[in-house]
Image (tube, rainbow, N blue to C red):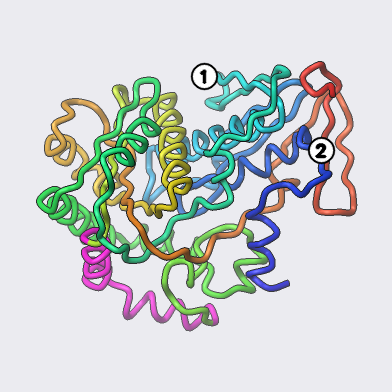
Amino acid sequence: MSYSTEVARMWRHTETGTDPRSYLELVRYATLAASSHNTQPWKFELKPGSITILPDLSRRCSAVDPDDHHLYASLGCAAENLLLAAQAAGLDGTYRFDAATTGVRVDFNAATPKRSPLFQAIPNRQCSRVEYDGKPLSTETLRHLESAGRGNGVSVSLLTNAQQKDAVTDYVTRGNTTQFADAAWAAELKSWTRFNARDAIRAGDGLYGPVMGNPDVPRWVGELFMRFAFSSKSQNRKDTRNIRSSAAIAVIHSEADDVSHWIEAGRCYERLALQAAALNLRTAFINQPVEVAALRPDFARYLGIGNRRPDLIVRIGQGPETLRSLRRPVEQVIVSVRGDTLVAAQNPITEYRASSPATAP
């Protein structure tokens, strides 16, 4: 199966006639959320009337994300997609952080189906790691983005002028210089890089070369490139062009530096990115200033946010659609099913029907 065929199969809305209340369909939508290095560090526990999203610590990135901040933010991204998909399926989802499991539980009650613009945008959201057209965004567009990026204890700062972009560029290039000098960081990035379509399809995760703007090559060629040509200098040139071409830089920041706020920051990012996609805008992470611990306090001072933690940095603008990353099959991220039987069909849609009023017709 070709890479484009796999992408089309995954990045889609459910076909007419498929039961929208299928819990596995809700999980499929959740897995289309963003995650650091496309590690997909989540597991889903299905029960009648609820889905719990649990951290998969076997997929953590200890070099780039030593405190697991991005891992838990990724759970928040998945939770936001799950809530939007449930709403579209006629389920009102109630979200809560579970401190015992450091996961997220969503309980469902029957409701009127609503396919919101953000839900409609789920298959269109992507990290577009290319130059944008540099055109400014309207005041109304910025207002929509700012509203989407706010949450419980989480705020967003939008930087739009050239001086602010230059300051962010400086922090990003300093972050690149630090990360590229770290052998563990480089080894970790290589381990999550899928240099060709065959490897990307087989793994269903990670960073496919062309998605990152690199050619599809045999792994040995890609490893030689990373060893001899992949450098902070070349990455800094690319990031400088990309940042200057962006219309705005969004910085999501939290009032507290703990797991529940990291998850909430992920939810806010996902809403902001979906709102951008609904407005036909592109987004891409430039997280180096928040990934390098020594830079993060200085970056917070520049932003004027006091002791708040800057969680995620996203550039936004108008640009071309690019390749999307793949996802693992839904069946691989389900850890257990309780209360009813999981029926695995031969077709790509596998349904879990929970015996509860939440899923009654």
Look at the image and tell me in which quarter the C terminus lies.
top right
Foreground: 320 or 339?
320
Q: Is 231 placed left or right of 26 in the picture?
A: left
Residue 236: quadrant of the picture = bottom left
* Mark 1 surroundings: few (<14), some (14-19) or many (≥20) residues within 10 A: few
Q: Is 344 placed left or right of 267 in the picture?
A: right
| Region in magenta | 218-244
Mark number displayed over residue 119: none
Foreground: 141 or 256?
141
* Mark 2 surroundings: few (<14), some (14-19) or many (≥20) residues within 10 A: some
Q: Is residue 344 above or below residue 205?
A: above
Where does residue 267 sit, x and y in percent of width and height?
A: 46, 33
- Residue under the image location 69 percent in, 68 percent down: 5
Where does residue 343 sit, x and y in percent of width and height?
A: 89, 40
CA separation, marks 1 and 2?
33 Å
Residue 252: quadrant of the picture = top left
Q: Is residue 20 above or below residue 359?
A: below
Mark number displayed over residue 19: 2
Residue 225: quadrant of the picture = bottom left
Please name the amino acid that badge 2 sits on.
Asp
Q: Is 130 placed left or right of 51 in the picture?
A: left
Q: Earlier in the sequence, mark 1 or mark 2?
A: 2
- Residue under the image location 33 percent in, 51 percent down: 316
**Tag 1 residue:** 99
